[in-house]
Image (tube, rainbow, N blue to C red):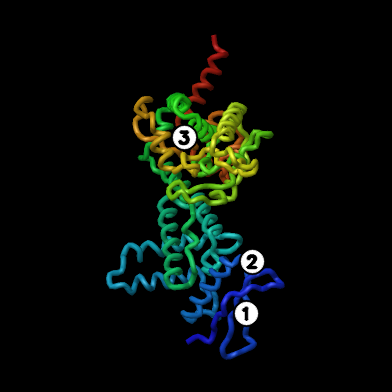
Amino acid sequence: MSKYYVTEISFWKTRNKFYFQIKNKLDKLDIVRVSEKKVEDLVKKKTEIENEIKLGLYGQEKITLKNVFDRFMESLQKRKNPPRSSLRDYPYCAKQLWTITVKNKLIQNMDVKDFTTEHCNLINVYMNENFTVRYNKECFGLLNRLFKYAVGHGLIAYNPNTDVDRSDFAIIKNNYNDNKEDPVLVQGGFEKSLTKINGLLEKLKEWNFQHFVMVRLMCELGGRMGEVLPLLIQDYNIGTNTIDINKTVNTATNVLHHRTKTKTGKRTVALSDEMGNLLKKLINIHLGSSSFKDLSIREKSKGLLFPSERNTILQGNNVANRIINKFNDELGIVGRINPHSFRVFVITLREYLEHKKKHMMQDAGHANKQISDLYVRGGWINVDRKRKDANEIAGFLG
């Protein structure tokens, strides 16, 4: 039985904080006070420490991610029928993971309790930029299993890897797979892609103005669908004709996160005059609707730019199935348009127009040009550029 115990949470009036104490039954002077401003943060710490005490781990040296890996592998080997492929592959994956440094610390040496979602997002970005598709997938899976193991054995209170957005990895995987076809929207080259997009926009404009403006914004912005769906009226700056990207919604679960996917994802993007006029018209329609009638100016500004009929954030699947792919048959589009392919098209188009890489990265919310380059469909850019070069040469000839 442990000599340590934890007191109940109390309020520290002079410091305006919540706190609890860790006491030693055998030494009255051995008292540690743990405090936090937010009670929910303190509850997490209290749970972790109580688990450590229960397991007899409190007061011992820190448990690193590598320690967790060693224990995890040991538990696999003790199974009646240990998974041979896992015993073979996990050490190679771990070797790749141990090369990763986050905030100047090798992750293998970090205390497993110190990992946050921010750390895991940085690890994810590093793997997207440096690992092969195979190791990216396998290493992410192993990392997730290690945190689940730590949760199951009371070493940590929650899995910090749960909220990591892996949508960019899906794009990377598609680009590395030579046998994978380009998204439906960008198949057939630049002119065919443009025909599909403009055809879709015309149909949407006739059918539903709000949906037209939303898809038009996605086409111009090149933003992730999860960044466009939760936009508020106050995110559009009328004076500067810019839009602030500062939050995202998980398009699979519809859970709103008051932060962007990555640090560079938080950004302000300049819009075209035409896009600005469309947004102003849409906002005026919203402000004149019955749902806005009794709201204050401040409350109105917090209204959604693209609300559902229930005045909630539109479901990602509904946007894809009932809006973006509604007119495929009429437009002669074979296959399903993935909303993310608007992002692929815009980044490719900007490369085609030879926009500055720095501006492309900033507007797309990418950390570096390598990620932006993965989106570019170089085939039709190269063909058109070569044709342009040939026409320039022909201009000098008789």
Q: Secondary structure at mark 3?
A: loop
Q: CA distance from mark 2 to mark 3?
A: 49 Å
The residue labelled by disc 1 is 32
Q: CA distance from mark 2 to mark 1?
A: 17 Å
Three-letter code, disc 2: Lys
Q: Answer yes or no: do the residues labelled 2 and 3 have beta carbons within 8 Å?
A: no
Residue 381: tell me if it is visible.
Answer: no
Q: Nearer the viewer, mark 3 or mark 1?
A: 1
Is residue 145 depicted above or below 392 in this figure? below
User: Residue lying farthest top?
Assistant: 398
Residue beneath disc 2: 37
> Residue shown at 56%/57% (left/top)?
118
Nearer-N-terminus badge (2/1): 1
Determine whether label 3 and label 1 are within 8 Å by CB. Answer: no
Residue 248, given in percent of the width and then of the height, sits at 53, 47
Task: Tell me residue 182's x, y (percent).
Answer: 40, 36
Question: Closer to the camera: disc 2 or disc 1?
Answer: 2
Seen as rendered, the residue at the extreme right is 14
Q: Residue at x 54, y 74 (%)?
A: 62
**What number is the disc on residue 377?**
3
The answer to which of 84 and 262 lies nearer the viewer is 262
State how far apart marks 3 and 1 are (Cα). 58 Å
* Residue with the most extreme left position: 81
Report the amino acid beneath label 3: Arg
- Residue at disc 2, secondary structure: loop
For marks 3 and 1, the one nearer the N-term is 1
Q: Amino acid at mark 1?
A: Val
